[in-house]
């Protein structure tokens, strides 16, 4: 069978299955997830064996150590995967939720209710846990998934898919909820991205280049995350102690995640607090790249280039700039931000309002760390990613966001005049 | 200047203007709409003069009479345009609406609020009123529009754009809320559809072929409407009087609109009521194309071919089939429907539930005409179209649907653990 035929069959299977998956009850879905969560623990050793094959190959192919890290599973991370399924079980059923209801003057009663999207294509790189996370989040919302894992995690992902399918079979769910493209040939992705007849949405997980490429080539709508160039702005009405701890957490809790802050903006009226704000970061050897004023504060500070303002370091580096009040901060952020997450430190509610009204980013926080940009912290349960797009879903993407809606209308013989 | 340069400049202008338009207050938007509504009435004659040029050209170019009808404005239709603006004024401001709010156990307070999408490209054919409708609906939701009207309505649309821009200038709104592509060269559309740097969404209005072509070529997400193959299913628990009048209205009120019913399905258990159901339609010479059973009922009935079940007649023609209960109806509809609107006639609420849960269409009505598939009838005010897609917006698209959202988070020094 040609690769095109293989991918096409997966698409057809998924589409055919979608209607049966869409009408599963919350109990049916949860009991299957429960079986899966247990089976993952029970099959820990098999998963680790498969994972070892991937790691051995990765070493043979001289993959970088961060890539090998992303690929590597452990007894603890497998427990984490199982635990995250338990969290998804606890979520309310996104399907059938009444989103709005109203009655028109003519007596027609309207309900807008959430329904599954249908078939979701997930393309990811080396993290094998995406196999399970994506399946469970999508399935909780009544969707089928077609997975395309990276070649690096081939054995781990396939072992996980086997466990998923056996568990869903045990739970008597319909077939074809989860299908993995059985080849690592790049051609398969090309076919996948053109299969708008069967697939409703594509979610890519991985590096920026992968995502850009997929977005360019896909004829199916893509929910994507590009950069996370996040800002903290310390306003003249900030509580400096709050600013210090929130800034430190925003940058240093985990500098490598997309919600980590990359740029600090300080209101010119309180620029004399700059050294105090930066001191905790210096103590942990965070590199500071500043504008002219900042640079002069410390011999270790480096000058920031124009490029720095639009760089996502994902590392212990912070660019720092003095700006002309909240207007200056808004101007800078709207120019350089990736529209992901921004925080303002202020005790002034009307300054906060100006800040959030004028800035076009998915998440705007007051006196809280940018690292709260996370589906779990939002109460969405596990997330399948964070969208920097503005259509359909923006910010953290949880199970509830993998739905569409329909309108249910009750009449009693209504004719339209 | 090249066409590419012209289109690019419009895009850049719109994108630059979008932030200022996004933060307009409801009062500012409404007072500008009020001025526009009045100026359209005041300039009635100028509009009719421009429209006459288009009509003369159309006749010269031997356009079909339905096309000329679509193009033609009258004092009455201009009053209608003005009136529809008044309706948009009455809508609540879609921007800033709190869509959800909740507090996490750690005390972080979340709000999900509606924000404008940004820049909307509208591509339409001969109806000049789209110029005003699209502008006003998009602007009410804080968006800029780039319009590309059809060559047939060139003079009318340009006259309307002139009035729009003068009115918005009079109201001291930002520039570039509405821009019309100044050339009818087809090349301009090609550039427009690739300008994802500046345009957030494309809305095509017109024939199915235009829409398919745009959807295929656009690198920008498209909100689109394809077919409206709508069904009425008369269940065994139907009130036959209700069925008769709802069916008649669904087909005959205006057979040419997308919400008109094309196929009637009758529960086999009540097939002996078929003649009674169809009688009012026969009285107005509606053509009936039926399955074997139906065909035999009347000498004037024609046999329906396989193609009939997936044909949008938009005319006084109805295809009719006897099905095996609600399951049979569900099966037929999921196979042939375009996912637009379906109605069931039944007094049995649990049959209705089975019907709407299993059918994947945007609108499902009980005991009400499919012709209620309309933004105005839903209470959305004017609509810019009806989406048969499932992402972002489904069903009637009003001002409130031309928004995205962002999250506003209140903390008091929250660090993420």
Image (cartoon, coloured by chain):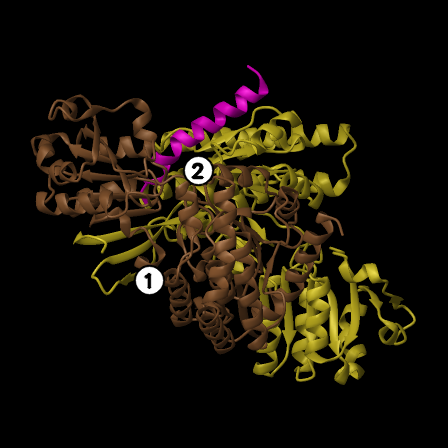
Chain colours: A yellow, B brown
Residue nearest the observer in this picture, A407 or B66: B66
The disc at residue A371 is none
What's the magenta region?
A1-25
Location of residue B244 (image quadrant): top left
For mark 1, name the chain: B
Q: Which mark is residue A36?
A: 2
In the rendered image of this protein, does residue B15 appear above or below residue B21?
above
- Label 1 belongs to which residue? B379
Relative to A294, is B287 on the left or the right?
Answer: left
Give the quarter of the image for residue A246: bottom right
Residue A14 drawn in magenta = yes
Q: Residues within 10 Å of mark 2 (few under 14, many from 20)?
A: many
Residue pictured at 85% horizontal, 71% vertical: A291
Residue B177 location, x and y as percent?
58, 65
Report if residue A388 lies within the magenta region. no
Say if A270 sits above or below A394 in the image: below
Tell me the quadrant of the picture where the N terminus of chain A can be found: top right
Q: Position of residue B164 (x, y in %)?
A: 54, 67
Query: Which element carries disc 2, helix, strand or loop?
Result: helix
Percent x, y of residue B145: 57, 59
Q: Residue at x 72, y 40 (%)?
A: A67
Q: CA distance from mark 2 to mark 1?
A: 45 Å
Label 1: few (<14), some (14–19) or many (≥20) C-alpha neighbours in 10 Å = some
In the image shown, does B285 or A251 lie closer to the viewer? B285
**Looking at the figure, which quarter contains the C terminus of chain A?**
bottom left
């Amino acid at each position: 069978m040609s690769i095109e035929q293989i991918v096409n069959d997966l698409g057809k299977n998924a589409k055919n299955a979608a209607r049966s998956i869409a009408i599963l009850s919350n109990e049916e879905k949860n009991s299957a997830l429960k079986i899966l969560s247990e089976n993952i623990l029970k099959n820990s050793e098999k998963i680790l064996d498969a994972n070892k094959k991937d790691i051995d190959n990765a070493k043979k192919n001289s993959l970088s150590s961060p890539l090998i890290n992303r690929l590597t599973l452990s007894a603890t991370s497998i427990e984490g995967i199982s635990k995250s399924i338990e969290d998804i079980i606890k979520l309310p059923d996104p399907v059938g939720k009444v989103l709005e209801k109203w009655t028109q003057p003519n007596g027609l009663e309207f309900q807008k209710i959430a329904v599954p999207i249908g078939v979701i294509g997930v393309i990811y790189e080396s993290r094998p846990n995406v196999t399970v996370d994506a399946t469970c989040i999508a399935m909780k919302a009544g969707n089928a998934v077609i997975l395309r894992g990276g070649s690096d995690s081939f054995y781990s992902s396939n072992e996980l898919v086997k466990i998923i399918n056996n568990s869903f079979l045990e739970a008597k769910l319909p077939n074809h909820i989860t299908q993995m493209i059985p080849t690592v040939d790049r051609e398969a992705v090309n076919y996948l991205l053109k299969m708008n007849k069967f697939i409703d949405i594509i979610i890519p997980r991985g590096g920026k280049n992968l995502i850009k490429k997929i977005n360019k080539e896909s004829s199916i709508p893509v929910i994507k995350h590009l950069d996370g160039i996040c800002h903290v702005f310390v306003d003249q009405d900030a509580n400096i102690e709050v600013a210090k701890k929130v800034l430190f957490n925003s940058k240093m809790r985990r500098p490598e995640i997309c919600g980590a802050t990359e740029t600090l903006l300080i209101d010119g009226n309180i620029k004399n607090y700059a050294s105090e704000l930066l001191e905790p970061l210096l103590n942990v050897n965070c590199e500071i790249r500043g504008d002219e004023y900042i640079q002069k504060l410390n011999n270790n500070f480096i000058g920031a280039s124009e490029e720095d303002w639009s760089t996502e370091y994902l590392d212990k580096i912070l660019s720092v700039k003095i700006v002309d009040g909240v207007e200056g901060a808004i101007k800078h952020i709207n120019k350089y931000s990736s529209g992901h997450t921004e925080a303002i430190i202020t005790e002034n509610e009307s300054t906060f309002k100006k800040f959030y009204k004028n800035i076009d980013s998915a998440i705007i926080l007051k006196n809280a760390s940018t690292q709260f940009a996370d589906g779990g912290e939002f109460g969405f349960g596990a997330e399948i990613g964070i969208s920097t797009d503005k259509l359909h879903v923006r910010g953290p993407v949880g199970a509830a966001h993998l739905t569409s809606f329909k309108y249910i209308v009750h009449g009693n013989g209504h004719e339209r005049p």
